[in-house]
Image: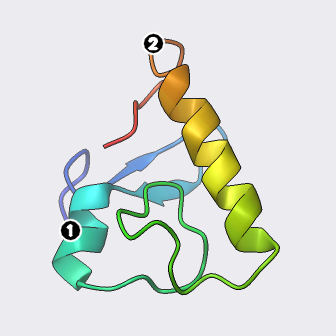
């Protein structure tokens, strides 16, 4: 894995996988990943709806985000 291509480390120290990493994997893992390019299709409700809402909110505020939506 390549830092800043496949993942980055957020300010709290957590590894965050990029949309490019998820696309290369080829499917939604169901864990409500921050940059899921599959619209959280395998994530169970109500977590799916919450993740979609957060993703939409972050993309609207991408100028304030450390790493805008991939």
Above or below 51: residue 44:
below
Question: What percent of the width, then of the height, locates residue 14?
Answer: 59, 54
From the image, tell me which residue sits under label 2: 63
Q: Nearer the viewer, mark 1 or mark 2?
A: 2
Instruction: Residue 43: name its quadrant.
Output: bottom right
Residue sitting at 54 percent across and 87 percent down? 42
Callout 2 crowding tier (Cα within 10 Å): few <14, some 14–19, many ≥20:
few
Instruction: Residue 6: name its quadrant.
Output: bottom left
Task: Indicate how the structure is coloured in the image.
Answer: rainbow
Question: What percent of the width, then of the height, locates residue 54?
Answer: 67, 45
Residue sitting at 49 percent across and 32 percent down? 59
Q: Can you see residue 12?
A: yes
- Are the residues at dot 1 and dot 2 in contact (C-beta closer than 8 Å)? no
Residue sitting at 63 percent across and 33 percent down? 57
Question: What percent of the width, then of the height, locates residue 10?
Answer: 54, 41
From the image, tell me which residue sits under label 1: 1
Of residues 47 and 65, the one drawn nearer to the viewer in this rendering: 47
Of residues 21 and 38, the one drawn nearer to the viewer in this rendering: 38
Q: Can you see residue 11?
A: no
């Amino acid at each position: 894995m390549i830092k800043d291509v496949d993942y980055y480390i957020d300010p709290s120290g957590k590894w965050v996988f990029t949309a490019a990493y998820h696309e290369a994997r080829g499917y939604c893992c169901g864990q409500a990943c921050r940059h899921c390019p599959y619209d959280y299709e395998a994530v169970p409700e109500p977590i799916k709806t919450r993740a979609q809402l957060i993703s939409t909110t972050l993309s609207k505020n991408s100028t304030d985000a450390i790493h805008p939506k991939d």
